[in-house]
Amino acid sequence: MTKGFAPRLKLAVKSQAKRAEKRQLTPLSEIQANLLNYVAELPDPRVQRTQKHSLKDILVISILAVIGGAEGWEDMENYG
């Protein structure tokens, strides 16, 4: 029985290796620039006098905190 599965297994391993070679990681600097550019385009709906921190900073910190495992506002505050 194992004779019948061996060729398929070898093909699967080879195809995974080829796919891994084709994939390239995006540089961190490019990811950061894309995130900041996207967030910078969002309009700030807050009243001007109540803006203690920029909306861009708040959004980036909250996104990264959630990626890092934050589960609530206090976790986001601690992350920031």
Image (tube, rainbow, N blue to C red):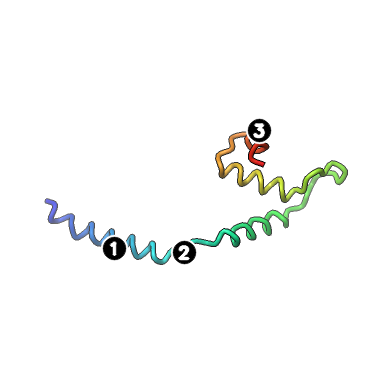
Amino acid on which the number 1 mark rests in the picture: Lys
Give the class, few, some or many, for how many residues have Cα within 10 Å of label 3's Cα (few <14, many ≥20).
Answer: few
Count every numbered label the image shows and give the total: 3
For the point 67% across and 37% down, the residue is 77
Amino acid on which the number 2 mark rests in the picture: Gln
| Cα gap from disc 1 to disc 2, whole angstroms | 18 Å
Amino acid on which the number 3 mark rests in the picture: Glu
Quarter residue 71 falls in? top right
Q: Position of residue 79 (x, y in %)?
A: 63, 40
| Cα gap from disc 3 to disc 1, whole angstroms | 47 Å
Q: Which residue is mark 3?
A: 74
2 vs 57, left or right, is: left
Secondary structure beneath disc 2?
A: loop
Q: Which residue is mark 1?
A: 14
Secondary structure beneath disc 1?
A: helix
Q: Quick one: label 1 or label 2, which is nearer the N terminus?
A: 1
Secondary structure beneath disc 3?
A: helix
Rendered image: mark on residue 24: 2
Q: Position of residue 62 (x, y in %)?
A: 65, 43
For the point 14% across and 56% down, the residue is 4
Q: Nearer the viewer, mark 3 or mark 1?
A: 3
Tag 1 near tag 2, CB within 8 Å: no
| Cα gap from disc 3 to disc 2, whole angstroms | 36 Å
Above or below residue 65? Residue 74 is above
* Image quadrant where one finds the C terminus: top right
For the point 33% across and 62% down, the residue is 17
